[in-house]
Amino acid sequence: LAQQGIAVGVCSVKGKRPYMEDEYRVLAHLETTPGAGAWGLDEGGDGRGAGGGGGLRTAFFGVFDGHAGGRCSRALTQTLAQCVARDPEFQRGGDLSTAIARGFARANADFLRKAERFNANDGSTAVTAFLRGRTLTVANVGDSRAVLVCAGGRVVALSFDHKPNRPEERRRIQACGGRVIFSFGVPRVNGILAVSRAFGDRNMRGAINAEPELQVRNLEVGDKFLILATDGVWDVVSSAECAAMAHQCVLQQGMTPQQCSAVLVSVAMQRGSLDNATALVVDLRGIWGASAAAAAAAGDGGALPTATSAAAAPLLLQRQLSA
């Protein structure tokens, strides 16, 4: 990713939960070979990934929020992107949206077969982004969320939460024989699940599906950061607030995406989030080349992170959290 001019940071914490069900995955170059090009930011990876693949270079970013156990979210980190990459449409460099839809269905079917064998009812959300050239395709299942931070800190929603009280989701659930019942103060599918789409959830198939909603955006010079996060962040920090913090942290205070992601999660914890929380921040400015990115940054009151600004970031991070 560094070779593509893209910087990525992620922060993922257990929070006040006794167990961790959030997962994330970043692939610098999505290939058809399982596991190729994968790197974990907490495992010393440099973001370059493995080359090859023979097709259009496609980067993958994903955040997964498990429920009823962490087996589904963990499985998706290993299977979801590769199910998309194995699709014939992806391999020929064709319609990415078609490959994503079929890949999501294949990954869900693979997990459900294993869940049946082990009598497991784990499930998971997934918010993912595929960056091919300067085209960003976001695919979402559940209530993890993707937002784009544009010039001036303006926020653009790239996903829409799948909640049972969304009118179209309620109609679909009821048409499948399910019900939307308020329980513990929120609408739930059959009184159990607070999201209307998810992977896994073997005991609720039919009413619950893993069909992704897709948003395709041709990036512009003013599009600066992509944020993917789980509801441990979004439950207490709005999309607009996250966008404003990312804009301030990176453009005004010179933080790296890694430090920015830590700010977002720390603010969520300070505000009383009770869930696991994960935030993944992608700095998109470099895809335009150094001169264009620097010009755009200068026109927006900020600059690309430098060695000096990065070194000062711990103090700036402390100031941000105490503000």
Image (tube, helix red, strand yellow):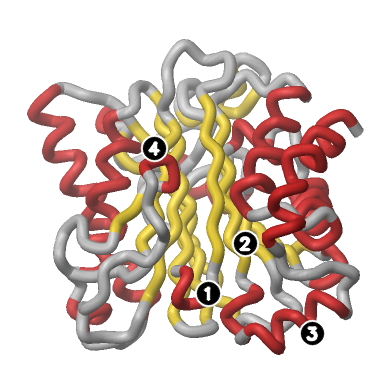
Q: Quadrant of residue 64?
A: top left
Q: Residue at x 71, y 63 (%)?
A: 305
Q: Are marks 3 and 1 in contact (CB under 8 Å)?
A: no
Amino acid on which disc 3 is placed: Ala
Amino acid type indicated by mark 2:
Leu
Q: Residue furthest left?
A: 117
Q: Which mark is residue 8?
A: none
N-terminal-most mark, 4 or 2: 4
Mark before the other along the chain sequence, 3 or 2: 2
Write down the residue under mark 2.
226
| Mark 2, secondary structure of its residue | strand
Which label lies toward us, 3 or 2? Answer: 3
Q: Distance between the Cα atoms at labels 4 and 2?
A: 21 Å
Dot 1 or dot 2: first in sequence order is 1
- Residue depicted at 57% across the width and 20% down the height: 15
For image coordinates 46% across by 11% down, the residue present is 18
Q: Is residue 103 visible?
A: no
Question: Real-space Cα distance between discs 3 and 1?
Answer: 22 Å
Task: Label 1, secondary structure: give it.
Answer: strand
Please give the residue where the numbered disc 3 appears in the rendered image.
295
Q: Quadrant of the N terminus?
A: bottom left
